[in-house]
Image (tube, rainbow, N blue to C red):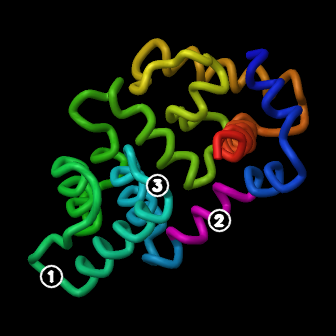
Amino acid sequence: MDGILRTFERASDADYSEGINWYPTALAFARSLDRDERKAAGVIAVLSPRQQWDTNKDGAAKIIKAAQRFSRVVPSVAGTYVNVEKAWRIANGENPEIVVQGSRPNRWLKVQRFYQNILGDTECITVDVWAARVAVPNAPEVIAGGLYRRIEEMYQKASVVLGSITPRDLQAVCWVTKRNEAA
C-alpha cells in the first residue's frame, strides 16, 4: 500500500486531473460508439489486454460500426483471436456481463474490472501491469487470482486512508503518474 500512497503523493496536478477524468472520459467514449453503453464498454474491455488505449478505441469503434451495419465480416483489429471474437459477440448482442467473464474467470479479472470501472463502479480496481507495479514493484506481467485480489485490496485500503478519492480513481491517478514517469 505504501507504493500506492507514495505514487499518489507524487502525482502532478495534470496527472491528478487526467486520472480523475479517465473513466468518465472512457464512458463518454463508449456512449459515443453505441446507445447501449454496456455493449460498447464490453467491446472496449475485451479488446483491452495488451493494447494501447488509442489502439483499443480504434478497434472497438471498428467492431461496433461493422456490427451496426450488420456486416458478416469481423473487421481486422489489434488483439488476440479470442478477444476479437468476444468483442464481435458482444457487438452482435451477446450479454457483455457473461462474455467478459471468460472461460477462466481468475485470468479475466482485469477485463471484468475494466468493464465495471468504465460503467461507473468505483470500488473495484482495474489492475494492469502499471497499476500492479505501483503496488508491488516486482509484479509479474500477468496479474491473476490471489495476487490480483491482494493488489485490488491495497488500492481500496489506500483509498480509505486518503479519504478523498475512490479506489477506482486512485488507481487511475497512480496509473497516469507511473506511466508518465516511465515516459
Q: Which residue is mark 2?
A: 25
Is residue 24 magenta-colored? Answer: yes
Q: Spatial distance from mark 3 to mark 1, Cα to Cα?
A: 26 Å
Assess whether mark 2 and mark 3 are in contact (beta carbons under 8 angstroms): no
Few, some or many residues within 10 Å of mark 1 (<14, 14–19, 20+) = few
Quadrant of res 140: top left
Instruction: Work out whether residue 122 can be spotted.
Output: no
Name the residue type under label 2.
Thr
Quadrant of res 153: top right
Please, which residue is most extreme toward the left here? 72
Instruction: Work out whether residue 80 can be spotted.
Output: yes
Assess whether mark 1 and mark 2 are in contact (beta carbons under 8 angstroms): no
Q: Spatial distance from mark 3 to mark 2, Cα to Cα?
A: 16 Å
Q: Which residue is mark 1?
A: 71
- Left or right, 131 with respect to 115, comes to right
- Looking at the rendered structure, which numbered label has been put on residue 52? 3
Q: Residue at x 18, y 83 (%)?
A: 70
- Left or right, 104 with respect to 122, comes to left
Can you say whether 169 is above or below 95 in the image?
above
Which label sits in the foreground, 3 or 2? 3
Name the residue type under label 3.
Gln
- Left or right, 146 with respect to 173, comes to left
Q: Residue at x 43, y 76 (%)?
A: 34
Numbered range of the magenta stretch: 21-30
- Left or right, 71 with respect to 137, comes to left
Position of residue 46 measured from the top left corner of the image (x, y, whole percent): 34, 50
- Which residue occupies the foreground of this view, 162 or 58? 58
Position of residue 51 measured from the top left corner of the image (x, y, whole percent): 40, 51
Going from the N terminus, do you reach mark 3 or mark 2 first? 2
Quadrant of res 49: top left
Going from the N terminus, do you reach mark 3 or mark 1 first? 3
Can you say whether 86 is above or below 155 in the image?
below
